[in-house]
Image: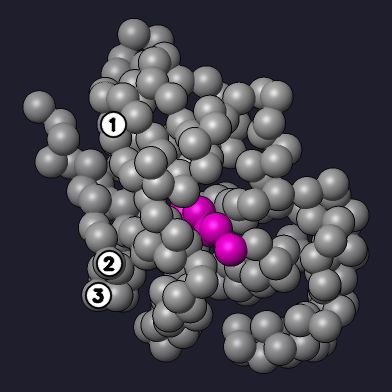
Amino acid sequence: MGMLDIQNLSVSYDGKTILSDFDLSISKGDKILIKGRSGIGKSTIFRFIMGFGRQSSGEIYMDGIPVDCTNIWDIRKKVAYVSQDTDIAEGKVADLINEVFSFKANKDACVKEELERIMSDMFLSPRILNKEYTKLSGGEKQRIYLMLALLSGKDIFLLDEVTAELDVTLKQKVVEMFFDNPQWTVLSISHDREWGDKATKVIDLSVKVN
């Protein structure tokens, strides 16, 4: 088995099949792009890895152990999940950072030591810390969300359309940041070609549709 294994995953809602017998084995350091048309189940895979829902059938394993309600906090300590919904908070950006890193899964993260470096990598001015999160642009929100994931100190990342609002230069910067680190395991959902150019494996869910 790999570090993360999905076996025969099937998901149905209101009688409609979203995923059917989906299999994926992920080894440490893999850089995987998942693509396919809207509604085909890409984001569902990520949510179920994080324990946000229950599959109709099949199993998800982390290090050979089935993911379930008894160990989901252990999984969340290892995995950083960045969803495509960036409306995650209100208040100042600095307060958001402080709040997120008071959570159980993130309590060991070294925030202060890494914050300045990551902000520079993301082309974010220190002034943004005193801005209201809800008043930021879509691209700024995406970069703040990514910064939180990077600050978490985790080495498994689930990234769902995280560069959709960024310009070409920033898209390339983010892709290189995640895909060029050999220690990180990254699963990305994206329609941006920059991810496909550097991915070690591309999974197109559309080809699985009968």
Please say whether residue 175 is one of the residues in the magenta stretch: no
Judged from the image, the secondary structure of the residue bearing numbered disc 2 is loop
Give the number of the mark in front: 3 or 2.
2
Q: Which corner quadrant of the image does residue 118 belong to?
A: bottom right
Q: Which residue, given by chain and number where applicable, does mark 2 sit on?
A: 200
Please say whether residue 158 is one of the residues in the magenta stretch: yes
**Magenta stretch prevailing secondary structure:** strand
Amino acid residing under circle 3: Asp
| Residue 39 visible in the shown view | no
Amino acid residing under circle 2: Thr
Mark 3 Cα-neighbour bin, 10 Å: few <14, some 14–19, many ≥20: few
- Where residue 197 is drawn, which disc sits there? 3
Earlier-in-chain disc, 1 versus 3 = 1
Q: Residue 49, position in %: x, y?
A: 52, 37
Mark 2 Cα-neighbour bin, 10 Å: few <14, some 14–19, many ≥20: few
Judged from the image, the secondary structure of the residue bearing numbered disc 1 is strand
Earlier-in-chain disc, 1 versus 2 = 1
Q: Quadrant of the N terminus?
A: top left
Q: Which residue, given by chain and number where applicable, does mark 1 sit on?
A: 22
| Residue 202 visible in the shown view | yes
* Magenta stretch, residue numbers: 155-161
Q: CA distance from mark 1 to mark 2?
A: 19 Å
Q: For this view, does 16 lie left or right of residue 79?
A: left
Give the number of the mark in front: 1 or 3.
1
Residue 130 drawn above or below residue 38 = below
